[in-house]
């Protein structure tokens, strides 16, 4: 199954006065690059959110935001103990350094930790919030998966088209390379005639020339490997595993074999087919960049 790395999903859950919404956006990335945004008072849920995502997604940049809202009007509490500490510390500084100014109420209320969100503190059962967050994130992940599957189906069809073209070109190259032995023999005869004109034939040099020409003309191994890689590509495309990285590796191998065929063959039609294969490989590579 081909899955795209592009996806979007939202989810929501509510109980009593508490509501939670989750939004997830994903794009292609070489690895799983997860970014979670949630209010500071609910940061204890970040680990659980990451677990949910990692169980579902393996690759891609994932931007996930979670919003927790309470329908009750927000209330704030004063941290009296902390206020006393601030006042005592300010009084000690004033005595020691003879400061003229005193700690004013406006300044005091702006100090870290003085004001606390009463609503968050009043939620005794953190399990309720955890359950709502999990539910909304799961729903959002479901939307992401659905979109990834739809995008993946389009990628799958496009890949099939380019892979079929590569397969057809490879078959043509195999047929055309069947005459390579005769072509090599003609080249060898031409070379023998040149050596004869130059003053005789050295048996050792003759053997070297023959081996070089035969190796240069023979592309049967490269064609066989191309066919094998194509079969593996088809298999991975239709398997249940998430094979983006393996498909990318196979494309590198297909590119390597087509380059070798292009450099070894002296047949113009074979060279044209090899160039066509390289073009389709590049099209596949563009698609694989977005496959999970």
Image (cartoon, rainbow, N blue to C red):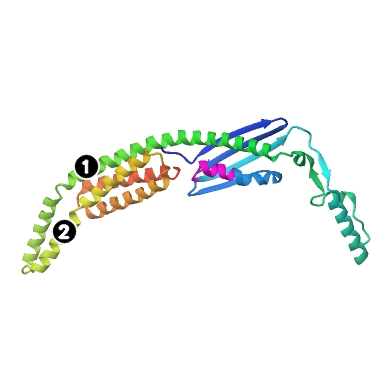
Q: Within the magenta stretch, is there residue 250? A: no
Q: Mark 2 points at which residue?
A: 213
> What segment is highlighted magenta in the picture?
49-59
Name the residue located 94 percent from the left edge and 61 percent from the top edge: 100
Classed neighbour count for the residue bearing mark 1: other residues with Cα under 10 Å, few (<14), some (14–19), many (≥20): some
Q: Mark 1 points at which residue?
A: 172
Q: Looking at the image, which is closer to me, 136 or 61?
A: 136
Q: Looking at the image, which is closer to me, 174 or 76?
A: 76
Q: Residue 201: which quarter of the image?
A: bottom left
Residue 263 left/right relative to 288: left
Overall secondary structure of the magenta stretch? helix
Q: In which quarter of the image is the C terminus?
A: top left
Please provide percent x and percent y for residue 76: 81, 41
Name the residue located 42 percent from the left edge and 34 percent from the top edge: 153
Please provide percent x and percent y for residue 41: 71, 45
Label 2: element kind:
helix
Q: How far apart are marks 2 and 1 (CA)?
A: 22 Å
- The vertical placement of 256 against 69, above or below, is below
- The vertical placement of 286 against 157, above or below, is below
Q: Looking at the image, which is closer to me, 112 or 46?
A: 46
Residue 281 left/right relative to 191: right
Name the residue located 91 percent from the left edge and 59 percent from the top edge: 91
Classed neighbour count for the residue bearing mark 2: other residues with Cα under 10 Å, few (<14), some (14–19), many (≥20): some
Residue 35 left/right relative to 125: left
First in sequence: mark 2 vs mark 1: 1
Q: Quadrant of the N terminus?
A: top left
Name the residue located 34 percent from the left edge and 39 percent from the top edge: 162
Please provide percent x and percent y for residue 230: 30, 43
Label 1: element kind:
helix
Q: Residue 284: which quarter of the image?
A: top left
Please provide percent x and percent y for residue 145: 50, 36
Q: Looking at the image, which is closer to me, 274 or 148?
A: 148
């Amino acid at each position: 199954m081909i899955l795209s790395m592009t996806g979007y999903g939202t989810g929501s859950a509510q109980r009593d006065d508490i509501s939670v919404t989750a939004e997830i956006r994903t794009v292609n990335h070489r690895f799983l690059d997860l970014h979670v945004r949630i209010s500071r008072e609910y940061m204890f849920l970040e680990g659980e959110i990451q677990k949910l995502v990692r169980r579902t997604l393996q690759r891609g940049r994932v931007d996930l935001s979670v919003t927790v809202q309470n329908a009750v009007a927000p209330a704030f509490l004063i941290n009296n103990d902390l206020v006393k500490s601030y006042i005592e510390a300010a009084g000690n500084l004033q005595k020691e350094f003879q400061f003229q100014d005193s700690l004013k109420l406006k300044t005091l209320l702006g100090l870290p930790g003085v004001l606390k969100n009463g609503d968050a503190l009043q939620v005794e059962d953190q399990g309720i919030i955890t359950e709502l967050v999990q539910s909304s994130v799961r729903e959002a992940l479901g939307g992401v998966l659905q979109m990834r599957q739809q995008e993946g189906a389009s990628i799958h069809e496009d890949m099939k088209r380019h892979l079929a073209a590569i397969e057809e070109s490879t078959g043509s190259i195999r047929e055309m390379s069947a005459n390579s032995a005769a072509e090599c023999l003609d080249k060898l005869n031409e070379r023998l005639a040149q050596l004869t004109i130059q003053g005789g034939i050295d048996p050792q040099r003759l053997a070297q020339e023959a081996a070089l020409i035969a190796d240069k003309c023979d592309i049967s191994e490269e064609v066989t490997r191309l066919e094998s890689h194509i079969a593996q590509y088809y298999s991975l495309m239709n398997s249940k595993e998430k094979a983006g990285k393996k498909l990318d590796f196979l494309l590198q191998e297909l590119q390597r074999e087509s380059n070798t065929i292009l450099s070894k063959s002296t047949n113009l039609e074979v060279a044209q087919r090899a160039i066509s294969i390289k073009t389709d490989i590049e099209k596949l590579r563009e698609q694989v960049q977005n496959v999970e």
